[in-house]
Image (spheres, helix red, strand yellow):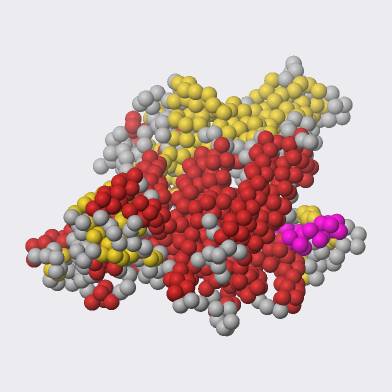
Amino acid sequence: MDKIVCACGNVNPAGTELCESCGRPLTEETKEKKIVDMRYEGSARRSQTYNKTIIDKVWNFFSSVKVGMWIIVAILIAAAIGTILPQVFYVPATNETDIAAYYQRVYGGFGTLYYKLGLSDLYSSWWFQVLVGMLGISLVIASLDRVIPLYKSLKKQKTKRHLSFLKRQRIFGMGKSDVTEESLLKTEEKLKELKYNIKREGNAILAERGRFSRWGPYVNHLGLIIFLFGVMLRALPGFYVDETMWLREGETLYVPETDGYFLESKEFIYETYSKEESKEVYGDAIDRVGTIAKNYQTDVSLYKGPEDSVAGHTEDLKFEKEASIQVNKPIKFDNFSVFQMDFRLDELATMTFQLQDKETQQSFGEFTIDLADPQPFYELDEGYKVEVMDYYADFTGFEEGVPQSQSPLPNNPAFLIKMYSPEFPKGETSFVMIKETVEPLGVNQHKIAFQSVETRDVSGLTVRKDLTLPLLALGGLIFMIGVAQGSYWNHRRIWIQLSEDGQTVVAAHTNKNWLSVKRDLDKVTEVAHLPKYLDQQDIDSLEEKVDKEEGV
Amino acid sequence: MAQSKKRRFYMRTAILAVLVVAIVFTVYSNLNKEKNAVLQVGDKAPDFVLVDMDGTERRLSDYKGQGVFLNFWGTWCKPCAKEMPAMDNQYGEYANKGVQTLAINIGESDLKVNSFSNRYGLTFPIAIDRNKSVMESYNIDPLPTTFLINPEGKIEKIIKGEMTEEDIANFMDQIKPS
Amino acid sequence: MDMASLSSTLLFIAFVAYLVATFLFGGAVKSSNAESTKSFDRWGKLAITVTIIGFIANLGYFITRWIAAGHAPVSNLFEFTAAFGMMIVGAFILIYFIYKAPALGLFALPIALLIIAYASMFPKEITPLIPALKSYWLTIHVITAAMGEAILAISAVAGFIYLLKNIDLTKRSKERFWIEAVMYVLVLVVGFVVASLSFYLVNYNAEYNYISKDETQHTIVYTMPALFGMNESEAITDGAFEPLVEMPPLVNAKKLTTVVWSVLFGTVIYVLLRLILRKRISTVLQPLTKKSNSQLMDEIGYRSVLIGFPVFTLGALIFAMIWAHEAWSRFWGWDPKEVWALITFLFYAVFLHLRLSKGWEGKKSAWIALIGFIIIMFNLIAVNLILAGLHSYA
């Protein structure tokens, strides 16, 4: 691992291919090439030079662009596999057995295999996360390993370069021409006009433009690293909240995970496009598709409990604001956003009944039961009264004579009711369901006749807090700046030298967009009568040239 | 030369170590996310205040120095119905030994809770969590879930699902103040 | 004339202009060499002028439809695909003014024509916006993403020309096979258009009842004779074609029928072409590329990725994330369309890195550019039609 001393006297780090100062090729391999490899200016990438310890080996592994590419390809293929069937979070099931059953039922044997292999939850699998993590390591190490030597060699580069370096540039021209000091000055002037930075050393000119674009890749990698770091932070508690809540019209509920915030739903609005009210041009589409949804909206009031309040506290709620939550328009407060995500229409809210005489249908009064808060007694006409003994919100049937309810949601309400009348002061018992009535204790004279219902809508809301967003945004911004910097600008260099034997040498290099540097050079050549250059990689033109010279 | 080599070695080791630790930590905590989000044994039990069916205000922090057997339930939930009479028996046993029982119903109506408690003749305090804020702060899913809270106000154990009378007795014993 | 029909007329004018310009570029390509620069200038100038006229008409279509609909016309499969076709022409014009390569027009315009024709096979009526799409991000995200994809597509066109020119078609080789396969796929798209148009012109319509995977009965209208029947399908229309094979509920037999008809029509057209020309299609087209400069095509291929990649990233990932955060409460949800945008991004990232390594210029790079275009088209077509997700609007 010795340093390499170039003929020009510059001491280069081991592994250097082109002298940092004058550009002479330093290795046999490089000397044999017709065009030199200008990546990283032929500098010694540090990773390639030391390979002793395990740490060095791991380091070099991640430093390699090739390895980085394979990691990207692996992520790319894995990501594609994950789209073959829907992932678990799009499957309408919540527990493991239901999910397994869903894949089996809908996608058959392949679905089961997909589920068993863990591909149905691929993006949260440990190995996928490790792959992304490895990409992160690769980004850090590969960038560190390249940006430092590149910076050094661009800083060290001399204006005057050795002929062996210039000869091996893709764009090169040499010839005896009457280039004088004056035309060199003209050249300088023209290049300045083209926004080049000019350095002059004796009879050598180095014109350089857009060097900052060389940092583009490293800037965008930095952006990506910040982005990945932000994604990583979401694993920490407190940075990220994702909850759902079902909020009924008229209900006030605590917003999960927040610091004492409550939401009250005033109204849920569901609108569709009608042919009469919307633009005429939509008519055809409405005819073809049928109903097209126009708006999902929950009108809410936001309240906050007192500062030191604890859970369960329902008094002293302070009104904060009113808002209409729509799709694309969440309500925002205190780092939280609440989104309109789902809804259920027409959940039963109240039911109205009459106490009637079974035969004559004569009514003895009407009462309305609020299903969220049924009262034990409803007083009716003089001498008539109804007692609600028990309430079954989601009635499923009797088990050993006991009525059962499978959930607290009023999907199928049933009531055990006692009817008091002057004839039956001790009451008649009736079991009232939506469409029928059971008389468990013998035949009654009176009945509870169903009159009407009122319904209310339920809004499905998502509560989200994501403190990593500013970091992600910063990462994204830096990435975009870096990409633009590296893509829309390019680093062009033009070398013009008068050698002592009266030859003029022209060479140019750019990291991308060769057309631009050729055009610049054409303009300069025109002014200063420089020798014609060749694109040594443009085989078509070279062949054409040979053809012409041979007179074909 | 040797000096810089050494420095380089430490530098690389440090960078690699930081990156690897960060990734291992992320993957590990993502895989255990569900567990992390929820309250864990050893955490301080979140304070709350609810009014019980008799109109008494029940605040968790008022029970400091006593064990609290905190049960979340619903009238429609069958395992809840099964374990509640057993809980009531043990409540009688342990109430004067410094273990208090508190049953929190999730957002049902007074009528329903009263009829339920009358049917089973329950004597321990029952409160309704009307806006589900206590349920949220304890991340309750499924019903029944029981929290054992020790005299220091820390969570001693979380039991998801039904308990037998023997279980209940053992659990209450566990949080008895010494 | 109202806005909506004016808009359709303008699209038709653009279509015809692109068709004419393709032939003019053909003329420019044939006469483009050092000796006949004058004649090249004439053909080339005419060709690009017609292209620009077409593009202006196309923009006119876009703007008038925007006014008629009250929102950017990128909200369903027809509108998006048509806009993508328009932007390919726009990207071509941009690159043409940098590099002046007529061969690019000769191949880019037919691709744009095919895409617009393909788009026109979907329901074309103006649809009102569903709540999820009601956001100014619809305009920003979709237009930027489509622009990025269109510029990236030019890279594939340049790669295609490079390959056509540099593959030795006289010898049997993998390359020769695959370049002809690309031709065949393009002919299949023509097959789809021809099949749709033929059945449309004879006004084919048949209604069937079927049982879907959630075991409920639905009605479906076939616009092509049903080769494949939906699960337990029964014809409602009298004398409807009895499906040859009935498919399980998981498979959408109507879409499968369309695909198979397109392949049938496409294959027949391809075979006919081969019989008439007595040559491979690539062999027929190869002379048109002879005068293009390989180095220039390689550079155009690279440069258009350089120009398109940042635009694509901005539109299809960054703007997409911002909008997804507003509409779906999360900036990233592993929806198939999102994942395929990420795959496209990663793929072109690989392309850019490979350009740094030795040997990944020329043919290899050209093939990668072609594959990139296939990924873009896959995301445009297959993800919407095959993989169900939040982005399926058709």
Q: Quadrant of residue A333 in the image?
A: top left
Q: Quadrant of residue A142 in the image?
A: bottom left
Q: Which of C128 and A65 is in front in this view?
A: A65
Q: Which quarter of the image is occupied by the C terminus of chain B?
A: top left
Q: Which quarter of the image is occupied by the N terminus of chain B?
A: bottom left
| Residue most extreme to the front | A178
Q: Which of C26 and C266 is in front in this view?
A: C26
Q: At x 56% / y 54%, what residue is drawn?
A: C92
Q: Give the magenta range.
A: C192-213
In the image, residue C308 lies in the stretch drawn in magenta? no
Q: Quadrant of residue A342 in the image?
A: top right
Residue B116 visible to the viewer: no
- Pinpoint residue A125: horizontal percent, then vertical percent: 43, 60
Q: At x 23% / y 64%, what residue is drawn?
A: A502
- Pinpoint residue A446: horizontal percent, then vertical percent: 79, 29
Q: Nearer the viewer, residue A211 or B71?
A: A211
Q: At x 80% / y 64%, what residue is drawn?
A: C226
- Pinpoint residue A428: horizontal percent, then vertical percent: 74, 31
In the image, residue C196 lies in the stretch drawn in magenta? yes
Compared to residue C314, the image places residue C67 above or below, namely: above
Residue A334 visible to the viewer: yes
